[in-house]
């Protein structure tokens, strides 16, 4: 609410209102699986789900002076911590200071550049899939943070090199299983990002870390035989690395990312790795693609609920998942794209852990996991209508 008041105040500023730019975007989507026992994000089963992929947003920019620009993005969509659908929240709210032609600073609530498509993570019109590859994009719960960033662009004859540094405090809500979720904050969360942008090639490397992540894990039914919720405090360290590449040449497009994340606390130590490769061909208004995704996790220390307490175990538990996706997009108009994607998820048969495709993005139900391992492949059908205005 505080940020929304700031947005309103800046937008009605009479001296800069004429320079206000408003753009909108949205997705109307439907998703269905072939097994009602394997609920994707604990919502999508054998009955069509129209809420998981659907969203609506507004992007606002206001040039206050030649050096200062105000920017905000508001999105309504399903979120982990809310029972109500399409809760409207600010995605980012910041002031940008353009110190020189190639150097800028931002202050406020910022989108962290940890993904290939971080700048347009919720704008389905701008990326090829019906949803971002869930195995990779579930690797971090920290997509936004309150703080400051510095950016400088080095310009060469054949390419531009962008270097960014972020210092933030990042709040998160992360659902681990159907009845377990964590709420906390990463203090002094540092993100370093480097991008090399050629005419047809983009290379990107990101590293992020937080030495002090504090919060609580809540377990519904944590006390056996009751519906009581058990509260488990945690204080952990977190590291994240992402390497990405994008190729767009002569009608062929290639997208690939490798992400690795890890945490180490008194109740849990885990390492997660994931990668995807998407290859697509554009022919006039039609785009056809094939994507292969891999997800691996290694729990070296975890907790188990016994009664009103937590017992730390060291299971040395490993498992993996892979998935293949075939999709097609058709450009209906200059601002509308229709997409269909068919996916098959295959899971290690030894996996009895409740999370299959990874924990979701922070407060975002569009990515994440199935509710259980059914012991067989799971097929998912997505269809979306993505638009901008």
Image (spheres, rainbow, N blue to C red):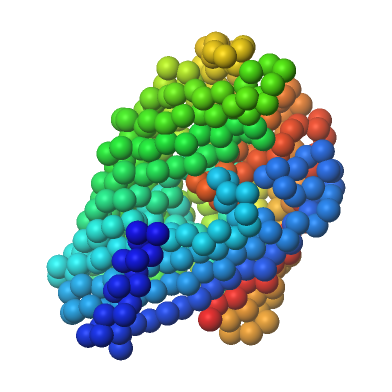
The residue lying toward the viewer, choosing from 127 and 29, is 29
The residue lying toward the viewer, choosing from 330 and 145, is 145
Q: Quadrant of residue 113?
A: bottom left
* Total labels drawn: 0
Q: In which quarter of the image is residue 63?
A: bottom left
Which residue is painted at 60% across and 16% down in the image?
Answer: 305
Asked if residue 273 lies left or right of residue 340, the reply is left
- Extreme-left residue of the structure: 99
* Residue 3 place in picture, x, y as percent: 35, 61
Which residue is painted at 20% across and 67% down in the image?
Answer: 97
* Residue 16 visible somewhere in the drawing: yes
* Residue 49 place in picture, x, y as percent: 75, 56
Which residue is painted at 69% across and 64% down in the image?
Answer: 29
Asked if residue 236 lies left or right of residue 108, the reply is right
- Extreme-bottom residue of the structure: 18
* Residue 103 place in picture, x, y as percent: 19, 64
* Residue 208 place in picture, x, y as percent: 35, 41
Instruction: Point out the image quarter for the N terminus.
Output: bottom left
Q: In which quarter of the image is residue 95?
A: bottom left
């Amino acid at each position: 609410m505080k940020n929304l008041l700031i947005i309103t105040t800046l937008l009605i500023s009479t001296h800069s209102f004429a320079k206000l730019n408003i753009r909108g975007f949205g997705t109307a989507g439907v998703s269905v699986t072939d097994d009602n026992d394997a609920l994707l994000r604990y919502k999508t089963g054998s009955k069509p789900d129209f809420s998981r992929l659907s969203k609506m947003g507004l992007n606002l920019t206001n040039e206050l002076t030649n050096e200062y620009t105000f920017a905000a993005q508001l999105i309504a969509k399903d979120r982990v911590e809310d029972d109500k659908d399409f809760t409207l929240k600010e995605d980012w709210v910041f002031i940008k200071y353009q110190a020189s032609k190639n150097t800028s600073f931002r202050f406020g609530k910022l989108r962290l550049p940890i993904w290939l498509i971080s700048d347009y993570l919720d704008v389905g019109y701008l990326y090829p899939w019906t949803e971002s590859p869930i195995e990779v994009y579930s690797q971090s719960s920290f997509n936004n943070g309150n703080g400051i960033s510095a950016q400088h662009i080095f310009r060469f004859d054949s390419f531009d090199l962008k270097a960014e540094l972020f210092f933030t405090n990042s709040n998160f809500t992360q659902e681990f299983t159907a009845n377990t979720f964590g709420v906390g904050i990463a203090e002094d969360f540092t993100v370093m990002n480097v991008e090399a942008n050629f005419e047809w090639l983009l290379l990107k490397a990101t590293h992020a870390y937080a030495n002090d992540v504090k919060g609580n894990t809540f377990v519904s039914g944590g006390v056996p035989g009751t519906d009581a919720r058990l509260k488990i405090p945690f204080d952990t360290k977190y590291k994240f690395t992402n390497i990405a590449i994008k190729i767009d040449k002569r009608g062929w497009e290639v997208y690939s990312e490798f992400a690795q994340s890890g945490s180490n606390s008194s109740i849990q130590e885990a390492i997660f790795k994931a990668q995807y490769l998407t290859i697509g061909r554009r022919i006039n208004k039609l785009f056809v693609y094939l994507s292969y995704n891999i997800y691996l996790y290694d729990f070296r220390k975890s907790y188990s609920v016994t009664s009103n307490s937590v017992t730390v175990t060291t299971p040395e538990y490993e498992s993996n998942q892979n998935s293949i996706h075939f999709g097609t997009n058709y450009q209906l108009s200059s601002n509308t794209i229709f997409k269909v994607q068919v996916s098959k998820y295959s899971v290690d048969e030894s996996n009895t852990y409740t999370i299959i495709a990874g924990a979701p993005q922070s407060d975002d139900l569009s990515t994440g996991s199935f509710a259980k391992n059914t012991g067989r492949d799971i097929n998912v059908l997505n269809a979306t209508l993505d638009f901008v205005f």
